[in-house]
Each structure stands twice: as structure tokens, then as C-alpha cells.
Amino acid sequence: MNETSFEEARLLATDAINQLAEQGRLGDLMIVDSAIIETAEARYFPYDAVSFLVLGNVSAALAGNVPVKVTKMGSEVTYEAPAGRGVAIS
């Protein structure tokens, strides 16, 4: 089994975030590129509301959300915070 590329993992995370936004009626969400974490096993894609990240609307900020985790082998997608410190990608 081949390792999932960063680009493939980001697409999977984007799909998961878009589904979450639609199901939860959260409005537009986006990945916070400066906060992406990579570990040996997975990549973690934090996200927040576009209105907060781009426009600075503090009332639109999400609270308590955890990153989308995409495993490097198998491309499993879950919502989980990294257990240890990873390497920020930016």
C-alpha cells in the first residue's frame, strides 16, 4: 500500500470538512494551512469558519472543533487531535 500524498490527504480533509459544514449548517469552513501538523502516521488539518479566518468575525469562530486526521497509509479520515508534537507544514 502506498503512502497518501499531502495533496491527496488535503483533498480528503477538505471533503470531510465540507460534509461537516453541510450537515451542521456551519457555513463555509476552510483549512488553517499555517496550523497543519504532520506526524509519522498521519496529517492533521485544523479548520475554522471562513468568516472568522478571512473577515475576522470573532462571533463566527468555531469552538471545540478538532482537526481532521488523515492517515498516511490507508487514507482513513477521522476527527482527532494529534497525541504528540508533529511538524508544522507551511
Image: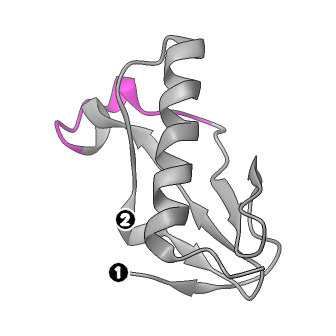
* Stretch in magenta: 54-63
The answer to whether residue 73 is above or below residue 48 is: below
Q: Is residue 57 left or right of residue 42?
A: left
User: Where is residue 28 shown, x and y percent of the image?
Assistant: 34, 26
Q: Residue at x 58, y 14 (%)?
A: 24
Residue 30: image tag = none
The quadrant the C terminus occupies is bottom left
Mark 1 lies on a secondary structure that is loop
Q: Earlier in the sequence, mark 2 or mark 1?
A: 2
Amino acid tagged 2: Asp
Identify the residue under disc 1. Answer: 90
Amino acid tagged 1: Ser
Q: Is residue 55 left or right of residue 13?
A: left
The answer to whether residue 18 is above or below residue 15 is: above
Task: Look at the image and name its color scheme.
Answer: one colour
The answer to whether residue 2 is above or below residue 52 is: below
User: Where is residue 38 shown, x and y percent of the image?
Assistant: 61, 80
User: Where is residue 49 shown, x and y percent of the image?
Assistant: 38, 34
Q: Please tell me how crowded label 2 is: few (under 14), some (14-19), or many (20+) other residues with Cα within 10 Å.
A: some
Q: Please tell me how crowded label 1 is: few (under 14), some (14-19), or many (20+) other residues with Cα within 10 Å.
A: few
Identify the residue under disc 2. Answer: 33
Q: Are marks 2 and 1 in contact (CB under 8 Å)?
A: yes
